[in-house]
Image (cartoon, rainbow, N blue to C red):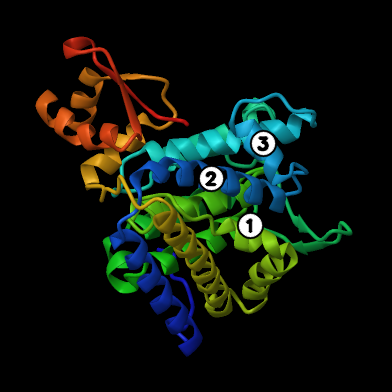
């Protein structure tokens, strides 16, 4: 099984400690529930903008926001498609269950979703069949990934490591697991294209599955995009150090702290400006909102089945959400449907 090499330096320890404290504050704080979907949509568009921008997508954040709203914009079709695909892939990850393993078939589906309409169909959701390389802005090769014959076994080996109970017991911190998986997949470079995007999505996926980002309120890719050259340099630095990930993980952990500090400040600002209609979400209410996200309307019967609870319990869960203005209800009795309030 894959065995990463790194040391917990004082710098890394301090960053991880502050990240854990900030995450606990965000999770435990009372947030105005009416703002949660707004923050989630904002996080999704920022992730889409930053991750595709790292790979050269020219769309500005306002244009990405317009694409996310379904508006028509004047831009290259490929650039629009990259953003649309990323948003759909992210929605698939966030709408899935928290906890549990990340399966190879799901990773391949995410790649297919990311690259559909950009790569030929035979290259979407399939491992590479020819060698590829990483080049600098001048086109000079800076890294030669493992050959195509190694793409599948190395990726499976990485997923086995991610899903292993030993990994969770030894490392404990999801930030470490996420950062290691990020670097490992982008270094395996298992696909013809889209390796950077899917590696960052895998890192995001691990944080969601572990419960670290259960609210989907922060976008660490913005930290990487703010200084793309440093991001690339840190990835290559670990390779030059025989895959010692110590400095890479220090960089990643610092990025989490910077991002979480911004998230905390924004929540505090919203909390001050909107002192009414506050509600602490229960895990079931979080799950309910994830199901509603991205759907026009959902019948109450569907929610009872998806949440595996009674119709009466659905009503109990959704009532305070309706009172807070975050969920809208239409109809009564068996014809009742719900949706998120997009205003």
| Mark closest to the chain's N terminus, 3 or 2 | 2
* Residue wearing tag 2: 42
At 26% from the left and 47% from the top, the residue drawn is 281
Q: What's the distance in space between the residues labelled 3 and 2, CA to CA?
A: 18 Å
Residue 240, x across and y down, in percent: 67, 76
Q: Is residue 179 above or below residue 283?
A: below
Quadrant housing residue 299: top left
Which residue is outermost to the bottom?
A: 10
Nearer the observer: mark 3 or 1; the answer is: 3
- Mark 2 against mark 1, which lies toward the viewer? 2
Kindly give the residue lying farthest to the top in the view shown: 335
Quadrant housing residue 191? top right
Q: Is residue 334 above or below residue 125?
A: above
- Quadrant for the N terminus, please: bottom left
Q: Which residue is mark 1?
A: 146
Residue 82's disc is: 3
Tell me whether circle 2 and circle 1 mark residues in contact (CB < 8 Å): no
Report the side of 35 relative to 140 (left or right): left
**In-image side of 263 versus 61 (left or right):** left
Q: Residue at x 47, y 53 (%)?
A: 204
Q: CA distance from mark 3 to mark 1?
A: 26 Å
């Amino acid at each position: 099984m894959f065995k990463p090499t790194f040391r917990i330096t004082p710098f890394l320890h301090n960053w991880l400690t502050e990240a854990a404290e900030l995450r606990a504050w965000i999770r435990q704080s009372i947030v105005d529930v009416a703002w949660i979907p707004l923050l989630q949509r904002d996080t999704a568009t920022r992730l889409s903008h930053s991750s595709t921008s790292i790979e050269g997508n020219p769309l500005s954040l306002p244009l990405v926001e317009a694409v996310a709203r379904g508006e028509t914009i004047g831009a290259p079709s490929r650039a629009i498609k990259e953003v649309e695909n990323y948003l759909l892939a992210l929605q698939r990850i966030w709408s899935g269950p928290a906890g549990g393993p990340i399966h190879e078939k799901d990773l391949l589906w995410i790649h297919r979703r990311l690259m559909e309409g950009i790569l030929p169909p035979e290259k979407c959701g399939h491992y590479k069949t020819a060698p590829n390389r990483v080049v600098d802005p001048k086109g000079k090769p800076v890294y030669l990934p493992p050959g195509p014959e190694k793409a599948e076994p190395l990726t499976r080996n990485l997923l086995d490591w991610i899903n292993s109970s030993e990994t969770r017991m030894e490392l404990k911190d999801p930030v470490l697991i996420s950062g290691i998986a990020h670097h490992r997949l982008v270094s395996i470079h298992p696909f013809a294209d889209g390796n950077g995007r899917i590696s960052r999505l895998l890192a995001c996926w691990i944080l969601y599955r572990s419960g670290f980002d259960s609210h989907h309120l922060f976008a660490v890719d913005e930290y990487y995009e703010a200084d793309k050259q440093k991001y690339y340099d840190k990835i290559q630095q670990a390779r030059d150090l025989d895959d010692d990930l110590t400095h890479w993980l220090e960089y990643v952990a610092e990025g989490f702290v910077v991002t979480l500090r911004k998230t905390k400040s924004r929540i505090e600002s919203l909390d001050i400006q909107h002192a009414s209609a506050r509600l602490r979400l229960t895990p079931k209410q979080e799950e309910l909102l994830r199901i509603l996200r991205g759907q026009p309307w959902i019948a109450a019967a569907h929610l009872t089945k998806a949440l595996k609870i009674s119709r009466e319990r659905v009503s109990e869960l959704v009532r305070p959400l309706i009172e807070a203005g975050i969920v809208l209800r239409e109809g009564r009795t068996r014809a009742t449907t719900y949706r998120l309030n997009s205003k």
